Amino acid sequence: MMKGLNPVRGYVTVGICGYAPERFLALCAKHRIYLWNLESTGEGYQFCLYLKDFYRLRPILKKTKTRLVIQKRHGLPFFFFHYRKRKLFFGGIALGAVFLYTLSLFIWSIEIEGNSHRTDSAIIKFLEAEHISYGSLKSNLDCGALEELLRTKYEDVIWASVKIQGTRLIIDLQENLVTNQTGKDTKNEVPSDLVATKNAEIFSIYTRAGMPQVEKGQAIKAGDILVSGNLPIYNDSGEVAGYQYCAADADI
């Protein structure tokens, strides 16, 4: 973890030689000066240390009569010092960072998933009519309100999820495919459940509409709900946000 911070904090590679380099190392340990990549060079030692610790070596060098030579300089502090007179260069970096940050505040991609009955372009046109399009400010978007708006606009949409990831607006829809495939008009159908009329065992079940409450091989009693016409609608947190009702239909 500390080595990952080396380039940011700045560090130097140095070599030492003199009368008592081992005593020098011992005093560094005593004063909690962190050294790494310690290697013997025959006449002394070579190691790395942080820039802030480098400035603490003067009294130790004087006390141990050790000579120190800087071999390499690493990290951002030396980079900035080397280019300190190039103000336009750093100004360009700062402007670029501000530009990228500004762009990140807007929506630049709209992804629609789960739609099979309506095209992406039709849904995008609907969003544009609601003043939601490419370049919209993310802080102005209410994902919960947009989910409710989609369910209200499209009656065959039984579930909608809207979320923002980076600069992407992701819309995930679930349509009532039973209506689309069979062409039945469910507006006038009364919401209802399929209920067992006698004791039995489920041999097979194929649900066309509703939420199955039993499975193959299960024993049931008269009055048990086999398929519920009550469809829960979940939000992004996995919690039930509401219900949609239909006339349960299945082959059992």
Image (cartoon, rainbow, N blue to C red):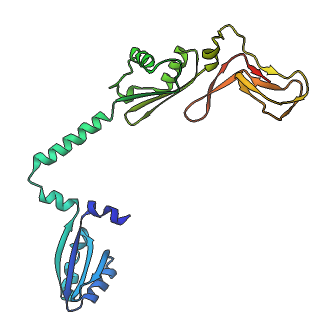
Decide if residue 200 is on the left or right side of residue 104: right
From the top left corner, tell me how far across and down residue 232 is, in percent. Answer: 65, 26
- Residue occupying the far right of the picture: 199
* Residue at the image point whose x is 19% and y is 45% from the top: 93
Above or below — where is 143 with respect to 5? above
- Residue occupying the far bottom of the picture: 19
Above or below — where is 117 with respect to 89? above
Picture quarter containing residue 17?
bottom left
* Residue at the image point whose x is 25% and y is 83% from the top: 45
From the top left corner, tell me how far across and down residue 126 is, in percent. Answer: 43, 15
From the viewer's side, name the closer residue of 116 and 57: 116
From the top left corner, tell me how far across and down residue 172 is, in percent. Answer: 51, 28
* Residue at the image point whose x is 23% and y is 89% from the top: 42
From the viewer's side, name the closer residue of 174 and 201: 201
Picture quarter containing residue 110?
top left
* Residue at the image point whose x is 64% and y is 18% from the top: 178
From the top left corner, tell me how far across and down residue 100 is, in percent. Answer: 27, 38
Picture quarter containing residue 96?
top left
Residue 166 visible to the viewer = yes
From the viewer's side, name the closer residue of 228 and 64: 228
